[in-house]
Amino acid sequence: MTLQEIIDQLGLKVLTDVKDFSQIIPTGGYASDLLSCVIAGAPRQGVWVTLQAHMNIVAVAALLDLSAVIITEGARPEPRVISKANEEGITLLASEQPTFQVVGRLWELGLKNGG
Amino acid sequence: MKSGKTRRERVITDEVAGYITRVEELSYEVKVQDVMTRDVKVATPDMRMVEVLELFREFRISGAPVASKGELVGIISIEDLIRALRGGDMAAPVSEYMSSSVITVKAFHPVVEALKVFTQTRVGRLPVVDEFGKLVGIITKGDITRGLLRALQSTYQEEELRRYRASHLFDDIVSDRTSLILRYTVKARDFVRGGRASSSIKRALLRLGAHPQIARRCGIAVYEAEMNLIIHTTNGGTIRVEIEPHQIYMEAVDDGPGIENVDLAMQPGYSTAPEEIRELGFGAGMGLRNIQRCVDELSLESTPGVGTRLKMHIYLSEGREQLRERGDEIKSMTRQEMKQRSSRDDSSGDH
């Protein structure tokens, strides 16, 4: 499944620069708001679901080469977070839904590898 | 860090990943005028549709801007031609079939602007105008792809050269023991710049020709050490990374407040981070454990009121570098092994 399909199916808002998301195929997913847990557990090229929206999510995503970060419950990162993400080539996506629902939908779509 | 044939093949995935972002960067650097077609075939409003068909056929194009006395008045495409063909109306003038609401792009804008228009409008081509609105060219998605590939090719060669130079650093400079030292100052509570040292180190290692896995392990270890300095120290601290052909030594040093109980600090889940920092997602008590997972040797020395010194070693030997991801290794470890491992790590420290 491509990142484009995930964006369409979950109605995610793309906060960073548009890329060819149909060429990005996430390998799995991880959900946590604790950064060190994400570092320990998120699969490479995976999707990370969190309600954190501050600068350090970009650092963590870049460190782990994640495909995208889905920020839940309508939390919105500051513009400088978004520009940093663009600089690092990280895709930030936003959902109004809580993490539980987002993860549930990803699972339904077949993204079941937890890293 | 010698380079060899196998090394070259191994780094490719991360290089490729790097160039994807490079394409995005380039779409901001490369201007529309650098990639557009300058020799524009132009139709006129009073031209007949059958003549447009000839124009398209002759130059193998699928659309053309329509201009009257040098002024852009519309755009005509193969779709318009098909409509005329179906209606048997090929004698009609272009003005009846062209679309007159023309979206243009400026020649001096970066190609990302053209890309945005393409994604928003689904048009196939865009007339390019200069600062006075005069038609100077035409651009299609194909032009952009070709232009970016060309630009990428040249920067790829530059990066190759850089990488080549950097990766030969250790071969070219002869001494009894050559090392490269990188130093970073980390300020306390500077969450916004958190991750700066670790991402710089990761990039430097990739450039030096280190295996992506090694770069990632160092990145993670330094990130956690960096965040510890930001979260817990009184005055921040320094990170020092010494790269040698056979090992990478990383050190995080601060001058306080120091750790009361080092053994407790090493335990997964233990953290002294205050609530407002935990809310940001830090202070999971996993930092040192993550470091342990990524390095071959770790030692933590601390004296309350004096400061803390965290030492981390990664050993590089051809065989080790080829190891699969350490994370997998840890996950498949039993609890007992974990225990043995952490006690071994504790005792191996020279504190």
Image: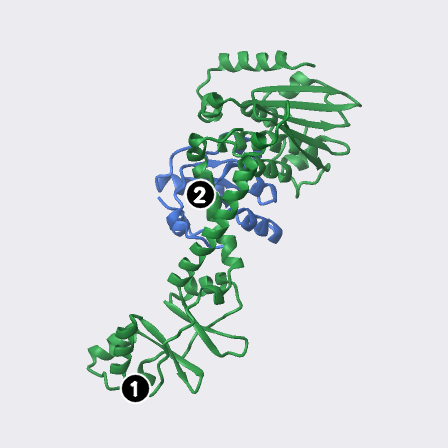
User: Residue type at mark 2?
Assistant: Val
Q: Is residue A79 above or below residue B291?
A: below
* Residue B234 or residue B347, whichever sits in front: B347
Image point (30%, 86%), residue name: B93
* Mark 2, residue position: B16
User: Residue type at mark 1?
Assistant: Pro
What tint does the image give chain A?
blue
Image point (41%, 78%), residue name: B101
Assess disc 2: are there few (<14), some (14-19) or many (≥20) residues with their C-alpha within 10 Å of its C-alpha. few
Q: Is residue B15 left or right of residue B234?
A: left
Q: Quadrant of residue B174?
A: top right
Which callout, 1 or 2, points at the residue further toward the start of the chain? Answer: 2
Question: Which of the colour schemes (rainbow, by chain, secondary structure, one colour) is used?
Answer: by chain
Q: Is residue B186 left or right of residue A78?
A: right
Q: Is residue B331 above or below residue B223?
A: above
Residue A99 location in percent, x, y? Answer: 48, 41
Q: Is residue B219 above or below residue A102?
A: above
Query: Distance from label 1 to label 2 (Cα)?
Result: 50 Å
What tint does the image give chain B?
green
* Picture quarter with the C terminus of chain B: top right
Q: Chain of mark 1?
A: B
* Mark 1, residue position: B93
Residue A32 location in percent, x, y? Answer: 52, 35
Q: Quadrant of residue B226?
A: top right
Marks 1 and 2: which is nearer the front? 2
Residue B186 location in percent, x, y? Answer: 70, 36
Q: Does residue B84 show up?
A: yes
Q: Is residue B123 above or below residue A82?
A: below
